[in-house]
Image: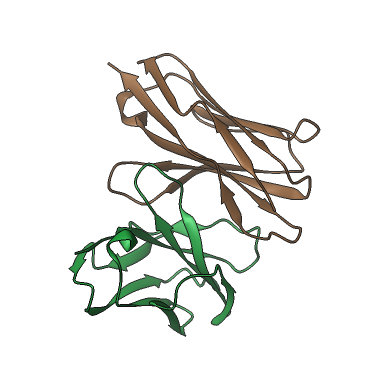
Chain colours: A green, B brown
Amino acid sequence: DTEVTQTPKHLVMGMTNKKSLKCEQHMGHRAMYWYKQKAKKPPELMFVYSYEKLSINESVPSRFSPECPNSSLLNLHLHALQPEDSALYLCASSQGRVTDTQYFGPGTRLTVL
Amino acid sequence: GENVEQHPSTLSVQEGDSAVIKCTYSDSASNYFPWYKQELGKGPQLIIDIRSNVGEKKDQRIAVTLNKTAKHFSLHITETQPEDSAVYFCAAISSGSARQLTFGSGTQLTVLP
């Protein structure tokens, strides 16, 4: 089973709202990732958690706050977003080494009004 | 850091014909090269990958070749079918300082029935 699940599938929020995106995997993977993807562009790395510790933060604005409660779960907390933050947010996981295969979830389509 | 260039950006082929997508990379320390297929509204799905210790890998109608000297790798799809229509991304991971998945810009493949 190589499934990564993400909820919700779609999210519409105002600029003053607080919301969270959730990601889950049960493959025993120890690295989890958040990517942002704009239309017709490749995914852009936002955050990497390795063994439940934040190992990479690609200079992402503080209105995005990641959290890794345990090795199977990854959250992305959203607050005071801007319309330009509208995008597909993808979660991925891998076994743990940087050269291990990354498996992506279906994404959450976020629209900020 | 790593830079991955992908060509062509769009590719149309007749059903049953072959499709070839090419990528070049810049970091000679890169040693893992996955290919992802992304259908509309879905997350990227790994379709094949190759590591730097082999020159070619095949899985049914899909093959990937790697030329480490020239720093390029290619995806070959034979006997294309309409369900192969999607955006394809190549990627590279370096074991050097970058240590993250770097994507190419993507190829929109359309298979005409």
Q: Quadrant of residue B13?
A: top left
Q: Position of residue B80 (x, y in %)?
A: 40, 21
Residue B65 visible within the image: no
- Image label count: 0
Q: Residue furthest right?
A: B69
In the displayed structure image, the side of residue B64 where residue A112 appears, left or right:
left
Q: Nearer the viewer, residue A113 or B97?
A: A113
Q: Is residue A3 above or below residue B4?
A: below
Looking at the rendered image, the quarter that the C terminus of chain B falls into is: top left
Q: Quadrant of residue A31?
A: bottom right
Q: Nearer the viewer, residue A51 or A58?
A: A58
Residue A12 visible within the image: yes
Q: Position of residue B79 (x, y in %)?
A: 43, 18
Picture residue at 46% right of the left edge, 47% below the top: A42
Q: Position of residue A19 (x, y in %)?
A: 26, 78
Q: Nearer the viewer, residue B53 or A77?
A: A77
Q: Position of residue A21 (x, y in %)?
A: 31, 73
Q: Is residue B92 above or below residue A111?
A: above
